[in-house]
Amino acid sequence: MEDPKRVEEGFGQTPLGHEDDSNDKELEGDNKCDNGECFDNIAKENGSVATGELTGKEEAPLEKTKSKRVATLDAFRGLTIVMMILIDHAGIAYPALDHAAWEGCMLADFVMPFFLFIVGVAIALALKKVRKIKDAIYKITLRTLKLLFWGIVLQGGYSHALADNINLAYGVDMKLIRWCGILQRIALVYFVVALIETLTTKRRPLVLSPGHLSIFTAYRWQWIGGFITFSFYMITTDSLYVPDWSFINHKEGKAYTVKCGMRGHLGPACNAVGYVDRDILGINHLYKSPAWQHLKACTLSSPRSGPFREDAPGWCHANFEPEGLLSSIPAILSGTIGIHYGHVLMHFKGHSQRLKQWVSMAIGLLVLAFLLHFSHAIPINKQLYTISYVCLTAGAAGVVFSGFYILIDVWGLRTPFLFLEWIGMNSMLIFVLGAQGILAAFINGWYYNKPDKTLVTWIQTHIFIDAWHSRNLGTLLYVIFAEITFYGVLAGILHKLGMYWKL
C-alpha cells in the first residue's frame, strides 16, 4: 500500500502537481515521488554522487527504484499541530507554554514559524519540476485562496461556541470581523515562495558546483526575494512615522488616546507594525486579546491574563494583530529558509552531507539571533516578527528537523513518532477539529440540563482535575491524554482507511 501524498503547504496530503489526474507529468515531469520527496531518485537526477560528495560532473542516469519517503516531514508537521493544541488549550494553566507578552520567546512563539518552515521544505520538493508554468501558477493561486477562505472562516470570529459554553453563540459582526490569522499568513508565504520557485524553474541547476555555498548561489533568486522582503520590512519599521492614535474599546464603551509621534519604536504602543494594521485594516478588525495584555504594565496578574490595572496605559485596552500585514512580510523569510532545507534534500544524497548543510545553517541562525537580541540591536519579538525572531525560530526548526531526520529516517526509529506522522498526514483536519476546537464545540452543543454540563467539561473536571486535585495539572493532562492522544488515534484510523482532507 503506497504512502499517502500531502499538500506542500502542510495542510493536506497531495503535493502540488501530484494529484491523480492527467496533468501530473505536464506539471512536474515524469518522475513521481510520494510527497514530492524522494530519498534517492531526486539526488541521482540532480547529479549528486553516491558518496554524497559534490562534483561538477553529471552522473549517468540510474535505473529508478522505489522511492523512500522522508517521514520527517510528516512528523515535523504533526509536532507543530500538537504544539498548537497544547498551547491553545493548556497555555492558560501554564504561562510558560503561552506566547511571550512582548519581547522574548516562549513555546507558543515557535508554532507559526515552524509551520512556515515546513511549508518551504515541502514546496521545494513538490515543485522540483515544473513543465507548464501557467498550470502551476493557477494551482498555487487556487490553494492560496482556499487557505485565505478557511482562515477567515475559522479565525474571523464566526464561531465562538468553544469559548462561550453558556451562550453557544455563532455569527460575527462584519464591523468586527478579524481578517488576518494563521492560515492567512501561511497563504501569503506559500504564495510568494511557491511563485518564486515556479518562475525560476528554468534557472535551476541540474548539477551543483563544488563548494559549501553552491546550494545558495544555485537558488540565488529565492534568497534575493527573501532579502528584498527583509529590506522592505526593516526600512518601513525604522522610517515610518507613527502619529498619535485613538480608539474605542467596545467591551468597555470607553475611548482611549495613545501618544506617539515617533519613528523606529519597537514597543507595544508606537510601532510601525501596529500602525499599518490599524490604518489599513482598521483597529476593530484586529486580534482582540493580544499577548501584550499579560505585561506587568497592563495587569497585576502578569504573566497570566487578568483584569487591567487601574493605571494601565491606554494601549493595553487596544486590539493588535500578531499575524498582521507588515509583520507577515518578514515571515516570508521563514518559508525561504525552509525551501533551502528542501533544496538540500533534493541535491544531496548522503545523510552526512544533508546534515552538514542543515545543522551548520541552524547553528549560524541561532548565533545571529542571540547576538542581535542580547546586543539590544534587534530584540526577539514574535508580535513584530523581527529578524532576530526569524533567525531564532528558523534555527530551532532546523535543529528539530535535523534531529527528527536522524532519529526517523537515518536510525529508523519510526514507531515512537508514528502518531506525529499520522497527524501530519491529516494536519488540516486535525488543525480544524483540534487546534481550532471545532469538534469540542460540536460536542458542547449536546448538553445536559445546562449548557455548561457537557461531555467535554465532565471528562475534564471529574477524570482529570478532581482526580489530581489540581486545575492546572488536570488541564495539562486532559490536553495531553484526552485531546492530543485522541487526535493521534483518530488520524491513525483515518490513515489506515486512506481518508485525508485535501485542500
Image: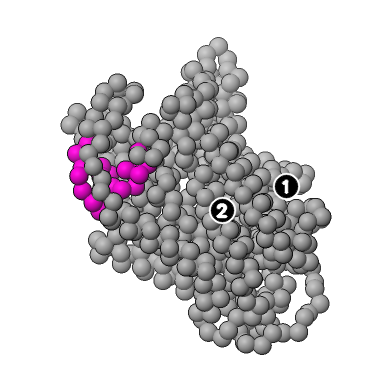
User: Which residue lies under the disc numbered 1?
Assistant: 495
What residue span does the magenta drawing correspond to? 258-278
Query: Height in image: 403 above or below 448?
Result: below
In-front residue for pair 152/200? 200
User: Which residue lies under the disc numbered 2?
Assistant: 191
Label 1 is placed on what type of residue?
His
Residue 112, position in %: x, y?
Answer: 48, 50
Q: In the displayed structure, does residue 453 sit left or right of residue 231?
A: right
Label 2 is placed on what type of residue?
Phe
How are the residues colored?
one colour
Q: Secondary structure at mark 2?
A: helix
- Residue shown at the point (75%, 66%) measured from the top left: 29
Q: Is residue 213 magenta?
A: no
Circle nearer the viewer, 2 or 1: 2
Q: In the displayed structure, does residue 440 sit left or right of residue 301?
A: right
Residue 315, position in %: x, y?
Answer: 26, 36
Marks 2 and 1, how far apart at CA: 28 Å
For the residues bearing labels 2 and 1, Cβ distance under 8 angstroms:
no
Total marks shown come to 2
Which labelled disc corresponds to residue 234? Answer: none
Q: In the displayed structure, does residue 300 sit left or right of residue 167?
A: left
Residue 70: tell me if it is visible: no
In-front residue for pair 262/12? 262
Query: Height in image: 143 above or below 258?
Result: below
| The quadrant where residue 445 appears | top right
Question: Is the N terminus in the top left, top right, bottom left or bottom right quadrant?
Answer: bottom right
Residue 383: tell me if it is visible: yes
